[in-house]
Amino acid sequence: MVEVYTDGSSVGNPGKMGAGYAIYRDNHLIKKEGVYLGIGTNNFSEYMAFIISLAEVLSLGEKSCRVYSDSNLLCEQMNGNFKVKNKNIYPLFVLAKKISSKFDEFSIEHIGREKNSEVDKLAKEAAGFSL
């Protein structure tokens, strides 16, 4: 099973967005990347980071995946505990559910920001935020 850390960032809300992710297998880094996403909200960037990372994991041929995110909203919505009320986020939620259903084993878990600093940095750098 691979472990994936994701984070989205918006410099301003809305503002320039970036997505960051890191994929690990047996505590060894397989891939990490930051992606510029254009202009939008932080929640949009969180979903995009999640979706991009899942697509990458599937492209690696992995069938089981555990995702960690510091976005409580994303985690609760994906786990079915919160409804998706934002009309701009709903299509991303549908896509995320569709992609996550491709895995034999899948889970998403909320973690604190301090445990997500590596991908937070990638997301902020991709958004153009100077660290």
Image (cartoon, grey):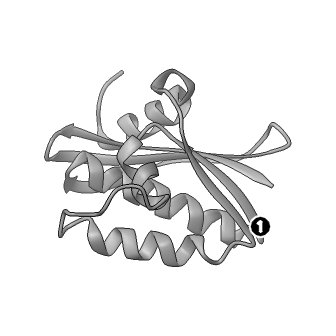
Number of numbered markers = 1
Query: In the picture provided, is 18 more to the left or to the right than 100?
Result: left
Mark 1 belongs to which amino acid?
A: Glu
Can you name the residue that lies furthest to the front here? 81
Is the residue 79 above or below the residue 101 in the image? above
Can you name the residue that lies furthest to the right here? 26
Figure quadrant of the C terminus? top left
Residue at screen point 44% across, 62% down: 80
Picture coordinates of residue 31 (x, y %)?
68, 49
Is the residue 78 above or below the residue 46 in the image? below
Q: In the image shown, does 55 or 81 lie closer to the viewer? A: 81
Secondary structure found at label 1: loop
Picture coordinates of residue 27 (x, y %)?
81, 37
Query: In the picture provided, is 18 more to the left or to the right than 87?
Result: right
Residue at screen point 28% across, 63% down: 84
User: Is any atom of residue 35 visible in this view?
Assistant: no
Picture coordinates of residue 7 (x, y %)?
45, 42
Picture coordinates of residue 111 (x, y %)?
53, 33
User: Is any atom of residue 77 visible in this view?
Assistant: yes
Q: Quadrant of residue 71?
A: top left
* Residue on which the image places disc 1: 62
Residue at screen point 68% across, 72% down: 59
- Circle 1 residues within 10 Å: few <14, some 14–19, many ≥20: some
